[in-house]
């Protein structure tokens, strides 16, 4: 997570597809201003998306939905079916928020851009997911170097429509608040990354056990969702996750697979429920005691 992008101060990295597109930058600033001026307790205002932006959403959501049937875990598919997102236009955040809240009690609130790490995770404890509202550049609809509304809604919100995942997100938020040191928060963040962002699980089906994903990052990535099975898939190990570095700008070369969905939920839930600043040291001691 990073510093909030405001409508008055929007700086994109040099390799961003829209960095030299003044119209796109202006649209980003306009959309960011909605989240920048909104305050909790107010009605979430609508964003007037352009036909071009709606077309990007329609293309990406359609193609991802097809890939989800093959690569997404069953619980995610159930959440997606319950949420019922529009397919031909960018969804308004107020309608996503209302539907998710009806299903699991979670809120999806607008922010202008990335928020500080502790705020992002901590708000999950209160049942709040902070969502950007801008959409990726139209020139490369299947790529984004940053979280956009495709990632936030198709990835995270459809997970939050599932009571099982919503409980894990809440527990994660509570865990982050007990991570009082920067080191403990970093360890927690890595576990969050290798589970709720790029997590994979062995799921039984008619053809036997298949590797499926439950991670929002993979579920919202048109390219990576078809490639994640080619990664180095390591056994489920929360301690190893917490000490493994990663690069968010590339396809993940290393993933950790849970042996089953139920085991993932139980073990990850227990990890979040008991996590505090001493957990990394406890896991390190346990690892050395088994050598």
Image: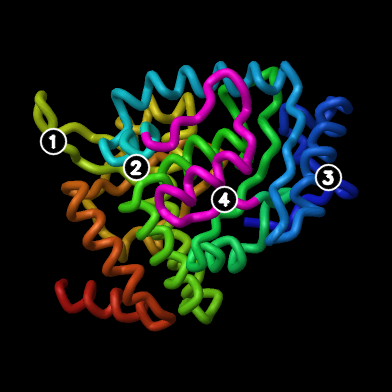
* Residue 73 among magenta residues: no
Q: Nearer the viewer, mark 1 or mark 4?
A: 4
- Residue at numbered disc 1: 204
Using the rendered view, name the quadrant where residue 253 is placed.
top left
Give neighbour class at mark 3: few <14, some 14-19, many 20+ (Cα, 10 Å): some
Instruction: Identify the magenta region.
Output: 82-109
Q: Using the image as rendered, state which of residue 163 and residue 29 is in the foreground.
A: 163
Q: Secondary structure at mark 4?
A: strand
Q: Which residue is pictured at 17% across the width and 78% down the height?
A: 289
Dot 1 or dot 2, earlier in sequence: 1
**Residue 214, labelled with which disc?**
2
Q: Position of residue 286 (x, y in %)?
A: 22, 77
Using the rendered view, name the quadrant where residue 79 is placed.
top left
* Residue 85 among magenta residues: yes
In the picture, measured across the screen, residue 116 lies left or right of residue 251, that is right
Dot 3 or dot 1, earlier in sequence: 3
Q: Which residue is pictured at 62% across the width and 22% down the height?
A: 89
């Amino acid at each position: 997570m990073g510093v909030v992008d405001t409508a008055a101060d929007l700086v994109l990295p040099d390799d961003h597809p829209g960095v030299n597109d003044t119209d796109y930058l202006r649209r980003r600033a306009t959309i960011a201003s909605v989240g920048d001026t909104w305050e909790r307790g107010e009605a979430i205002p609508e964003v007037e998306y352009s036909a071009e932006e709606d077309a990007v959403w329609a293309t990406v959501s359609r193609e991802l939905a097809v890939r989800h049937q093959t690569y997404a875990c069953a619980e995610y598919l159930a959440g997606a079916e319950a949420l019922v997102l529009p397919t031909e236009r960018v969804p308004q955040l107020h309608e996503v928020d209302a539907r998710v809240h009806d299903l699991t009690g979670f809120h999806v609130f607008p922010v202008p851009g990335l928020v500080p790490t502790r705020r992002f995770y901590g708000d999950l404890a209160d049942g709040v997911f902070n969502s950007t509202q801008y959409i990726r550049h139209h020139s490369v609809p299947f790529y984004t170097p940053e979280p956009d509304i495709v990632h936030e809604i198709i990835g995270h919100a459809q997970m939050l429509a599932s009571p099982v995942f919503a409980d894990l997100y809440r527990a994660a938020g509570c865990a982050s608040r007990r991570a009082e040191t920067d080191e403990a928060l970093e360890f927690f963040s890595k576990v969050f990354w290798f589970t709720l962002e790029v997590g994979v699980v062995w799921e039984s089906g008619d053809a036997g056990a298949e590797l499926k994903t439950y991670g929002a990052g993979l579920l919202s990535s048109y390219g990576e969702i078809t490639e994640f099975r080619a990664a180095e898939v390591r056994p489920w190990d929360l301690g190893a996750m917490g000490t493994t570095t990663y690069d968010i700008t590339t396809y993940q070369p290393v993933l950790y697979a849970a042996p089953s969905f139920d085991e993932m939920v139980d073990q990850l839930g227990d990890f979040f429920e008991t996590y505090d600043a001493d957990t990394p040291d406890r896991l390190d001691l346990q690892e050395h005691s088994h050598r």
